[in-house]
Image: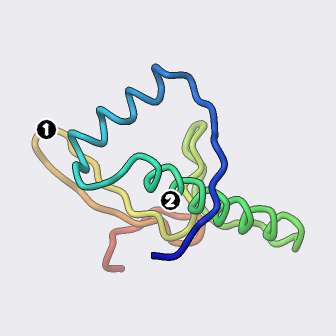
Amino acid sequence: MEYEAKWPVYLPITDLLTLEFHLMDTRPDMKLDAFVAQLVKRWLAAETERLALRKSGTAMQGFQWKNVFLPDGTSLRTSYSNIVEFAKVHGKAILPPYS
């Protein structure tokens, strides 16, 4: 096993315990430090892409619904009166997934 340098990060204990108990229920094989490292890597990738798009001047395509922005390619699932529907954001519109 290869050595990997690490640095402590201090979080409120209640948040840390809540996350750890959630992982015990949903992902019992996942270690807390590995999960947090994965979250940070995903956030950095998304943030880097967002900043690159902002700098390039190219507007991100998607659909604005109330105060939620749904980027192009977002898959949606809704249910009403026991009827489940699926859709996908294409450009600036929401369309059936197979159109």
* Percent x, y of residue 89: 48, 65
Instruction: Please give left or right for residue 26 compared with residue 48 in the image.
Output: left
Q: Nearer the viewer, residue 5 or 50?
A: 5
User: Closer to the N terminus: mark 2 or mark 1?
Assistant: 2
Give the residue type that dot 2 points to.
Gln
Q: Residues within 10 Å of mark 1 (few under 14, many from 20)?
A: few
Q: Amino acid at mark 1?
A: Ser
Q: Which residue is mark 1?
A: 81
C-alpha span from label 2 to label 1: 37 Å
Confirm or deny contact between disc 2 and disc 1 (CB under 8 A): no
59 or 28: nearer the viewer? 28
Judge whether 17 appears above or below 50 on screen.
Answer: above
Which secondary structure lies at badge 2? helix
Q: Residue at x 34, y 69 (%)?
A: 96
Mark number, residue 38 = 2
Which residue is painted at 28% across and 48% down in the image? 78
Find residue 87 and report its horizontal and vertical position in percent: 35, 63
Name the residue: 49% across, 22% down: 13
* Residue 85 percent across, percent down from the top left: 23, 56
